[in-house]
Amino acid sequence: MRKLSCTVTSLVLALALCLAPTLSLAADLTVSAAASLTDAFGVMKAAFEKANPGTTVVNNFAASGPLLKQIENGAPVDVFASADEKTMDQAAAKGVIVAGSRVDFVQNALVLVQPADAKTRITSEADLTGSGIKRIAIGNPASVPVGRYTQESLTSAKLWEALQPKLIPGESVRQVLDYVTRGEVDAGFVFATDAKIAGAKVRVVKESATTTPVRYPIAVVAASKNPKAKAFVDFVMSAEGQKILQNFGFKKP
């Protein structure tokens, strides 16, 4: 894989990760959530605060892997929402979440996208091997769920090894989306909800098949002392919370 130069987006994300423990000191309820939930959980925050007067929610968004690492390192987080089961399985194995609080709350899909004005148009993953496609943005499979889903999809299609020289890793699905919307790559793999957020800036080529369902689990962090943590999880699962998520393109689990 090749790497693009550091972007403003990645710098801001890195700064947010570094400051997360400090920022959370002033928070009544700290929610660490996958980057693809940024817009939906922004609305969720306002709705939860309205339903729980006196409670302030501070959202911390990044790739699921780095968020788990923060929690492992003692960051004061109350609720963790991951974009994949694997990361939450790791959280459970490390004992950093309350096992009985874990629940799958939405489902998503992996999609292949291009910049809206891409010169070389493609219709399938197989077209990515063509000479007109030089750069393909994906999440870093080591820490970003969308990257793992992408690797799984391309491996199943017997394209993973052949495409290695063209792959540009991003540190979150939103960084991958930025690469695509700015035309810095010829194609990329993001979640369907992220493509929806980008609107006319991207062209959705197709939904890419994954053998592992793209499900998002949420759980209360074991070290949390905040009694509102479970209430937030319940709110996400409520009719109001689910409607917010569906408005952003997420599907029921």
Image (cartoon, helix red, strand yellow):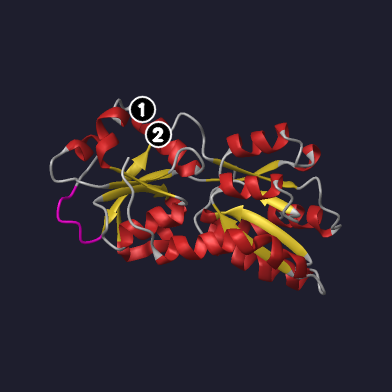
Q: How far apart in space, not on screen, are marks 2 and 1 (Cα)? A: 6 Å
Residue 128's x, y, as percent? 22, 40
Image quadrant occupied by the C terminus: top right
Q: Is residue 55 left or right of residue 239?
A: right
Q: Is residue 35 left or right of residue 27?
A: left
Residue corresponding to mark 2: 151
- Which secondary structure dominates the residues rendered in magenta? loop
Q: Quadrant of residue 30?
A: bottom right
Mark on residue 155?
Answer: 1
Instruction: Name the residue located 15 percent from the left edge and 51 percent from the top edge.
Output: 120
- Kindly identify the amino acid type of the residue bearing the numbered disc 2: Gln
Residue 237's x, y, as percent? 70, 51
Q: Is residue 166 visible?
A: yes
Instruction: Name the residue located 57 percent from the left edge and 44 percent from the top edge.
Output: 65
Crowding near the residue tagged with mark 2, few <14, some 14–19, many ≥20 C-alpha atoms within 10 Å: many
Q: Residue 167 magenta-drawn?
A: no
Query: How many labels sit on residues?
Result: 2
For label 1, the SS is helix
Residue 216's x, y, as percent? 59, 44
Report the front residue among 11 and 202. Answer: 11
Contact flag, marks 2 and 1 (Cβ < 8 Å): yes
Q: Is residue 29 above or below residue 67?
A: below
Q: Is residue 89 above or below residue 184?
A: above
Magenta-colored span: 116-121
Instruction: Name the residue located 44 percent from the left edge and 64 percent from the top edge.
Output: 9
Image quadrant occupied by the N terminus: top left
Q: Residue 118 magenta-drawn?
A: yes
Q: Is residue 59 above or below residue 139?
A: below
Q: Is residue 244 visible?
A: no
- Kindly identify the amino acid type of the residue bearing the numbered disc 1: Thr
For label 2, the SS is helix
